[in-house]
């Protein structure tokens, strides 16, 4: 067996008898300072251990969300009617999607951006509207011309008043005129305004009756509106309810549509026309002239455009009176990040999320004196940022965010005014990775702190002790 004396021989920490040691005031002071230094350095090391460190690199985009990018938006247009508001997407590869409706919602708003009713359903847009007779200079006038005074009077006399709001310079108004006048004559013969009095067809020249057309939010020509007597009993935000006709415009179809409207009203009852059982192609007209557009579109990850404008295949627009001023309530790219994940990512990168919705709350108002044909354009440069966070030794959570810079401008154009967002994605992405810290490294540093401070304090104590002894010997006149 190995004796205890041999085991003791490998003791690196041999003890000195207490009576052979000497305590000093300088040693006590250094011991207190050393202990305080150890505590301070330990606190610094502990704080550093719990502080998250990251590394940032720029790499070629290797997105996990495929070849398409989602654009979420919510915008308010005080002077663009939901009736004609269109969301279009195009890109450099030739993609051209017009009037996207599947993922888009529209709400009529007033000039103060307040909603004036439920969601506006524009319905399917016909690819073509059938027109009838060609322009004939000898067309017999049948529709009653209206102005502001006569409109208010007749709308309270006839149960159904159908009005064609037109502009003489409009191509579609010119094509509609023969059919409309013939239809008005036929309906007048079948339903005499004096003897029957259930329906009247009229017309309004919007180049002369500007205020009347503005009051009814006419933005496209021609607009055929159906007014029902008694609808003023159901006002919403001070606006009368009425409908817009979207069917074919040939004489035969128009006559049938008017007869369907009359059929819902008994001849004996000329008071109100609130109930409608007809099957003609019509939809509620917007109550106000503004529109809030919200939803999302998916676009290819190539340079492209998101365009919002007034669009119709059977209407003309007076570009000199169009105003595309708007407020961007929200605009972002990519998948929606939950607030919890975003706050978790901000723990790593405090400035994260400041540029993914840079245009939120911005107003773009056309204040120019000459406001004709003013297009508002936004140039967006998008960069993807990917954050990798470690929640455990094996699990990683990836947060993908698209941030962008924006530059906007107002410019006059020879075409219909639009709001255009030019977007371009960077081929590179920013990768932010959390650098994990091992507990063993933390323990090693703590041991180094304790050992280092203890050793340095011992060296300083030895130097100080020997210096004091030397000074005492010199004072006593002793020599070595």
Image (tube, rainbow, N blue to C red):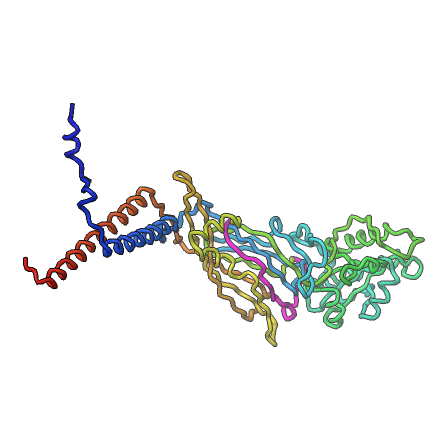
Q: Residue furthest bottom?
A: 369
Number of numbered discs visible in the structure rendering: 0
Displayed quadrant of residue 366:
bottom right
**257 inside magenta stretch:** no
Residue at image coords 17%, 31%:
7
- Residue at 52% from the left image edge and 58% from the top image edge: 357
- Above or below, 123 relative to 184: above
Point out residue 344 in the picture as x, y percentages from the top left corner. 47, 49
Residue 381 to residue 18: above or below: below
Dividing the image into 4 quarters, which one contains the N terminus? top left
Judging depth in this view, the residue of 444 and 70 nearest the camera is 444
Rendered residue at 75%/53% (across/down): 282
Residue 244 sits in which quadrant?
A: bottom right
What's the magenta region? 313-335
Left or right of 4: which side holds 156? Answer: right
Placement of 259 over or under 171, stated as above or below: above
Return the residue found at the far top. Answer: 1
Depth check: 341 or 280 in front?
A: 341
x%, y% of residue 393? Answer: 39, 39
Q: Quadrant of the C terminus?
A: bottom left
Most extreme residue toward the front is 476
Residue 381 coordinates in the image, percent (x, y): 45, 59
Residue 12, by quadrant, is top left
Q: Position of residue 351 (x, y in %)?
A: 45, 57
Q: Is residue 404 found left or right of 152 in the rendered image?
A: left
Q: Is residue 331 magenta?
A: yes
């Amino acid at each position: 067996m190995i004796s205890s004396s041999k085991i003791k021989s490998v003791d690196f920490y041999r003890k000195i008898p207490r009576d052979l040691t000497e305590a000093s005031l300088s040693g006590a002071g250094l011991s207190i300072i050393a202990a305080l230094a150890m505590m301070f350095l330990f606190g610094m090391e502990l704080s550093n251990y719990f502080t998250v460190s990251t590394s940032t690199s720029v790499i070629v985009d290797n997105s996990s969300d495929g070849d398409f990018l989602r654009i979420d938006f919510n915008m308010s247009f005080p002077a663009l009617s939901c009736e004609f508001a269109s969301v279009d997407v195009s890109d450099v590869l030739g993609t051209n999607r017009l009037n996207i409706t599947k993922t888009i919602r529209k709400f009529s708003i007033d000039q103060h951006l307040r909603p004036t009713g439920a969601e506006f359903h524009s319905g399917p847009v016909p690819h073509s509207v059938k027109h009838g007779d060609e322009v004939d200079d000898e067309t017999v006038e049948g529709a009653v011309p209206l102005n502001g005074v006569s409109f208010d009077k007749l709308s309270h006399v006839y149960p159904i008043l159908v009005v064609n709001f037109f502009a003489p310079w409009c191509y579609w108004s010119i094509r509609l005129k023969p059919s409309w006048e013939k239809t008005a004559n036929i309906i007048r013969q079948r339903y005499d305004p004096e003897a029957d009095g259930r329906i009247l067809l009229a017309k309004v020249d919007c180049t002369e009756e500007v205020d009347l057309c503005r009051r009814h939010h006419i933005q496209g020509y021609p607009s055929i509106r159906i007014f029902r007597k008694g609808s003023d009993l159901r006002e919403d935000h001070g606006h009368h309810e009425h409908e817009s006709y979207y069917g074919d415009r040939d004489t035969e179809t128009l006559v049938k549509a008017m007869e369907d409207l009359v059929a819902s009203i008994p001849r004996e009852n000329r008071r109100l026309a609130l109930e409608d059982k007809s099957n003609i192609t019509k939809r509620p007209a917007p109550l106000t002239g503004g529109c809030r557009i919200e939803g999302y579109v998916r676009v290819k990850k190539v340079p492209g455009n998101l365009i919002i404008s007034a669009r119709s295949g059977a209407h003309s627009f007076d570009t000199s009176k169009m105003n595309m001023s708007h407020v961007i309530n929200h605009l972002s790219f990519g998948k929606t990040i939950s607030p919890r994940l975003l706050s978790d990512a901000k723990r790593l990168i405090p400035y994260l999320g400041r540029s993914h919705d840079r245009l939120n709350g911005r107003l773009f108002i056309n204040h120019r004196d000459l406001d004709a044909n003013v297009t508002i354009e936004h140039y967006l440069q998008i960069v993807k940022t990917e954050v990798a966070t470690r929640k455990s030794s094996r699990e990683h959570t990836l947060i993908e965010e698209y941030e962008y810079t924006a530059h906007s401008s107002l410019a006059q154009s020879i075409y219909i005014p639009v709001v255009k967002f030019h977007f371009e994605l960077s081929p590179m992405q920013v990768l932010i990775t959390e650098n994990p810290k091992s507990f063993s490294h933390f323990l090693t540093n703590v041991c180094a702190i304790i050992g280092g401070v203890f050793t340095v304090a011992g060296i300083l104590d030895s130097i100080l002790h020997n210096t004091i002894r030397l000074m005492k010997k010199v004072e006593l006149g002793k020599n070595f």
